[in-house]
Amino acid sequence: MSQPVSRGIFALLVVAAVVAAPFTSRGVDAQTRFMFLRGQSIHPAFEGWWPNDDGSFTLWFGYMNSNWEEEFDVPIGPANYFSIAAPSTLDDLGVDGFDASSADNGQPTHFYPQRNPFLFTVVVPADFGDQELVWTLTSHGRTNRAFATLSADYRLDPQVMSTEVGGAFGSLDDRLRSNIPPALTVEGDRHRTATVGEPLTLIASATDPDDFPPRSDRGQPPKDLEEFYSTAGVGASVVSSAPGVRFSWIVYRGPARHATFDPVQMKAWMDTRVWGNSPWSPPYILPEPPPGNRWEDTVTFDQPGEYTLRAVASDGASFTYENVTIQVAP
């Protein structure tokens, strides 16, 4: 009979697997996927688009930071900018497309590890045509680009978004096509002031208007490794995410290392490691929402400057955002 496995044992098993990897046979080496903690670059991502009732189009963007630990701060400028270009104009990464007038389209300047999907949107007009909206990011001396177009291949709907993020444990339920994203309300002004070392209170409410996908988890932590690694009911090639309303604050612009949240926030990025404080982290058990679905947190800054915090609400399949910009005085 299999014996229960504690969190500590799970961690040790993961570490042992990583340590053992270099000593495996050549046949296994050929299939090894390395986990880089740092030193890799960021890849901007065009997630897709959908039409709006007024004839305009919403383009969705995110990114992949190939590191598991390293975070980046890349200010708006020659290393982090948008360009509007004719088709194929910026295919050559050596071509500089920087134009200050179009560089800032609301993209982040702080970049968390790994995959951060569907993180922000840009609305383009009905006559956008065959132009490309190009996001250029340079990190560790390497330039990468995402090319957003209105190609039919990139058209989204809520179900496609859900499958891309492993929503509802990777469900392909057709009802996801009409899924309504969370309703999010952030109390207070969108522009605030704070002082170094003094906690600032943040209050937000998030609810799921259609209660779909329904909140659920996998009951209890897995009893053993066989249950833990089971892919029953989940596509093995899709990262799985627990369904249900969840909420987190992230640092969207400004150095996150100078901001401390209390309590510690659930990650909004795809940390798929065991017990990773992430909805994509096995065993996929979400904390219960607070009374009235009203989250009250504090943030404390240890350096002055301007910071943009982003409130992130999700039902596991779709996302809603609100920004709060804070000017922190010495």
Image (cartoon, rainbow, N blue to C red):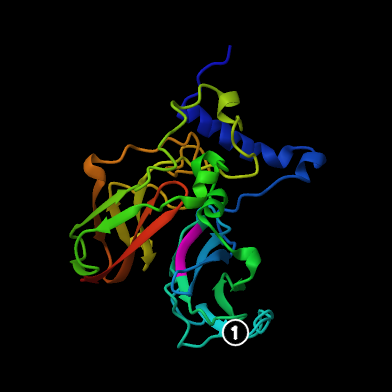
Q: Up-down: is 231 above or below 121?
A: above
Residue 33 rendering spot, x and y as whole percentages: 68, 48
Predominant secondary structure, magenta span: strand
In the picture, the quarter occupied by the N terminus is top right
Query: Does the stretch in magenta take in 280?
Result: no
Residue 258 rendering spot, x and y as whole percentages: 32, 62
Residue 184 rendering spot, x and y as whole percentages: 31, 55
Name the residue nearer the viewer: 127 or 60. Answer: 127
| Residue 76: quarter of image | bottom left
The type of residue carrying mark 1 is Ala
In the picture, the quarter occupied by the C terminus is bottom left
- Residue bounds of the magenta highlight: 117-121
Q: Does residue 271 show up?
A: no
Which residue is painted at 59% across and 63% down in the image? Answer: 155
| Residue 305: quarter of image | bottom left
Which residue is painted at 26% across and 62% down in the image? Answer: 301
